[in-house]
Amino acid sequence: MINCEEIRDELERVVDFRIGEGASKKYPLVFNKKTLLSRLTGPAIFTDGGKIYLPAQFNLSSNDSDNQMMIASAVRHESDHIREFIKLQEEMGGSEEYDPKLINRMLEDFFLQPQFRENPTLAHEIFNIVEDNRIDRKAREELPGLRHFSEEKEKPLYLSRRPNPRYLMKRGRELDAFRELFLEKTLLDKTVDEPPSKYKKLLKECVDMARSAEGKDIHASLDSTKKIYAKFKENFNIKQPMPKLPSFAGRDHGKLCPGIPRRYSGSIKPREGREEEDEETRQREGAGEKKKEMRQGGGDEERSKEKKMSQEEVKGKEKREKKENKDEEGEKLEKKGKDGERSEEVKRDEQVRKEGEIPEKKISKEAKEKTKKDELERDKYRYYPGSRPFIRMVPKPSPGVYLKVPRTSNYDIKEAQRRIDKYNGEIRAIESYFRKLEERYRGKRKAKQGEEMDIREYVQAELEYEATGIRPDKKMFKKRAPVKRKAAWAVLADISASTGFGFGYRIIDYIKDALLIQGEALSYSNYPFGIFAFHSGGNSLREMINYKDTVYVIKDFGEEYTDQSRGRAMSLYPYGGTLMVNAIKYVSDNLKKMEGSPKGLSIITDGEPDIPEEVRAILDKIQKDGIFPFLFVIGAEHERYAKSLIDNYVIIRRDKINELPNEVLRIFTTYGIIK
């Protein structure tokens, strides 16, 4: 269990990162000791649009590190809600200062439209699921570390705490069961149980409608809500009392928008139906053991006793079920009157709001027109993040890097040698290049620069020439000092999480090949060189808050290139995101200290960095410092971005990714040796 107030500073930084500098002061965190619920239901976490309410303690996981990550993720989620509300008010053309009450009223009016008159609370629940899915998917795309943590830790934990839809179906509560299936499939990509065959098609249709809002704005979530509500209305009796589903990820969505009319009757418990299944399983196992004993030597008396016992159990179970059904019917009858009163209140509210309000259809048309304009602007300014419409939301980078030396094993060293043998021809060609260069500098071709002159011999020769007019053929030089050009080189490879994927291949495997073949070539050159890899961020709270690059040192400039260096390259694994700025700065600062000319830096990446404008600035700076950067970008779809960053770039098509190692070697051969 963690004390949330103890990590207030870190959580406030999450708010500032998602909304903007100083946002944690405008939208404060409120720690409420009363919101700590049981371990199964989780704490109540919600926003009213102006504040973020959190429990004083958080204990969904047995691991405190995971608890910290989950509460930070929850704060990020609620911050994203507030950010969406701010954008919505700007689109509505409201006052310059953000007013959460205005947004709450607008959403309340949306759910009180005539098309939701049967059950506005159901519409509100559907909207919460669709909107949560939209903003969470967007956040996972922006933060690879969050995506990894969600897949590995959050989703399995949350799924284990959801009620059993099959149990709800068995109890005749089909609407409740389908609501739970829709939530699980949309937000967790899985369901506790396989959905019944008669609802599979409907579930897929509803989930597809919810997913259609991904990558869009809040208006898309509102449109999807209308379509999904219509599907619910077609297939279920949605006028019946509707129990409240357990909170998801600790979020109490009933408090998201105050004033939403509620028609919830009771609540469904977390893991409801699972405990009964466990008891039934134990009973079946016990009955099986008894039958075994009977077969082994039990008499007729034992069999008759067992029959009587089983009959009594069946009768008792039937009585319990009848009693529960009667209780449910009684509850429904008691609450009919209350629901009727509420529906009348809803009708009165609708009549009051008919005048003086902006129709929802009008708002959606204006929003659609603005969306089209934004899409045009996006295509125009996509690779210029300084332009206002498309600022990519990434954590605020922290200065410096985390330095790591990869651990290696005998397997990595053997695998490295196997891959080197695969590129034996290319490596031997590089070796022959350097042998020719060595012969050239041994005296076959002497360079005049650096020749040391004998001053006395030179003066005597000049005097004889003035007296006789004949220049004597005398040796006037002590020695001819060979000037050997010596380059300095570095290779920096992106090993972010996206390099672990590909169509029938893994990008990182070809990056490893490129590092190995470049290392072999540079080792023959006797040039000062370094080989590095990097990723940014990660899964831990520290890596999310202090967002910077982690640089893996495969071979530093002052080290020898050995089998250990080869093994380090093979031990790399995909992880994190692509900040890139810190890593380039660290490697270029060390490269500047090396003697040699030219100085080159090969950067291998499979996508766009988090902050392209800062990468462009650092690449311009190192060129002024005398370092020539070369960018190798995997994927033809990234060519526009590469062109906006640097002149010297090479595009590696994904269907020809096997050309990456040779292309990296070709650039080094061209600029590091021949020129």
Image (cartoon, rainbow, N blue to C red):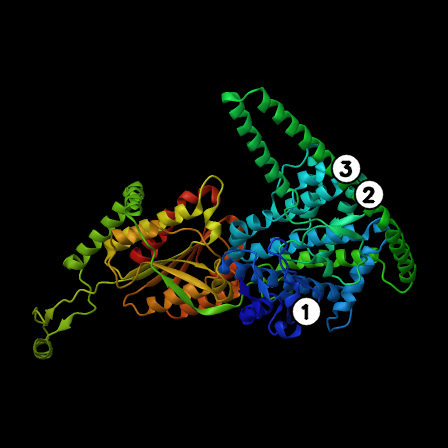
Q: Which mark is residue 51?
A: 1
Q: Which mark is residue 322?
A: 3
Which mark is nearer the camera, 1 or 3?
3
Cα separation between marks 1 and 3: 47 Å
| Image side of residue 116 versus residue 650, left or right | right
Up the image or down, 4 lies above or below 406; here it is: below
| Image side of residue 431 versus residue 364, left or right | left
Cα separation between marks 2 and 1: 40 Å
Mark before the other along the chain sequence, 3 or 2? 3
**Label 2: few (<14), some (14–19) or many (≥20) C-alpha neighbours in 10 Å:** few
Are the residues at dot 2 and dot 1 in contact (C-beta closer than 8 Å)?
Answer: no
**Label 3: few (<14), some (14–19) or many (≥20) C-alpha neighbours in 10 Å:** few
| Image side of residue 638 versus residue 162, left or right | left
Which mark is nearer the camera, 3 or 2?
3
**Label 1: few (<14), some (14–19) or many (≥20) C-alpha neighbours in 10 Å:** some
Horizontal and vertical percent for residue 615? 48, 64
Mark before the other along the chain sequence, 1 or 3? 1
**Residue type highlighted by circle 1:** Lys
Horizontal and vertical percent for residue 349? 89, 60
Which mark is nearer the camera, 2 or 1?
2
Cα separation between marks 3 and 2: 11 Å
**Residue type highlighted by circle 2:** Glu
Up the image or down, 80 lies above or below 417; here it is: below
Horizontal and vertical percent for residue 563? 25, 51
Horizontal and vertical percent for residue 356? 89, 65
Nearer to me, 319 or 47: 319
**Residue type highlighted by circle 3:** Lys
Residue 405: name its quadrant.
bottom left
